[in-house]
Image: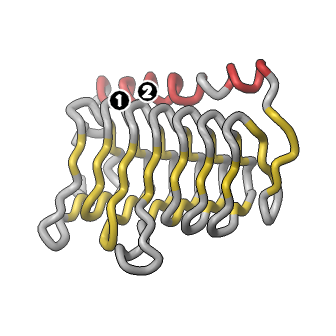
Amino acid sequence: MADLTFTLDGATPELAGDVFVAPTAALIGAVRIGPGASIWFGAVLRADQNRIEIGAGTNIQDNAVLHADPADYPGYPVLLGEDVTVGHGAVLHGCSVGSGALIGSGAIVLDGASIGAGALVAAGALVPAGREIEPGVLAVGSPAKVVRELTEQERAGLVRPPQLYRALAERYLRQGKAAAR
């Protein structure tokens, strides 16, 4: 099983003790991952120019790419709160995502963009550089536009993916399909 964890310029990924990292996920440089988080197959967390911080319980799904900007241009790290869901194939570049938010599959969030806590960025949406998406809203399209506030049922539904992915990570670990790093 390949270890795709890389120390770069003295910066080594830091993981809480119960983080699940799939064997084909790559963690590079100044990455910090909180307790109960999971990083799935083919995901790339590339902190070779600035830091990436992943909050507790957050799940980064298959083939998602997180990349931080150089510290001097334009200078944005990637900062994710707790219990964030980053869908399959999403790209997050130099941005921040508040706790409990969901970034849909194939969505792109660019430099300096800020996604509020409990917001839902729809699958395939493009959040342009510098755009702020307020907490608790639905943003769709390219460029992403806020179309409405989430319903109570939708807000409650955002809690489920982190729970499901934590249970799935524990299942993989129990069966020896991957190792916690």
**Along the horizontal axis of the image, is 76 left or right of 30?**
right
Viewer-nearest residue: 123 or 135? 135
Q: Residue at x 32, y 37 (%)?
A: 34
Q: Amino acid at mark 1?
A: Gly
| Mark count | 2
- What is the distance, in whole Å, between disc 1 and disc 2 at their CAs? 7 Å
- In this picture, residue 71 sits left or right of residue 1: right
Image coords of residue 26 (percent x, y): 34, 59
Tell me where residue 100 appears, x and y as whole percent: 56, 32
Q: For the residue carrying disc 1, how many other residues have a C-alpha within 10 Å: few (<14), some (14-19), or many (20+)? A: many
Q: Are marks 1 and 2 in contact (CB under 8 Å)?
A: yes
Question: Which numbered marker is on residue 36?
Answer: 1
Helix, strand or loop under label 1: loop
Q: Nearer the viewer, mark 1 or mark 2?
A: 1
**Quadrant of res 16:** top left
User: In the current view of this chain or complex, which residue is farthest to the bottom?
Assistant: 73
Labelled disc at residue 59: none
The residue that label 2 is drawn on is 166
Residue 56 percent location from the top left of the image: 38, 32
Identify which amino acid the numbered label 2 is placed on.
Arg
- What residue is at 78 percent from the left and 48 percent from the top? 139
Q: Is 140 rendered above or below residue 85? A: below
Residue 158 sits in which quadrant? top right
| Colour mapping used in the image | secondary structure
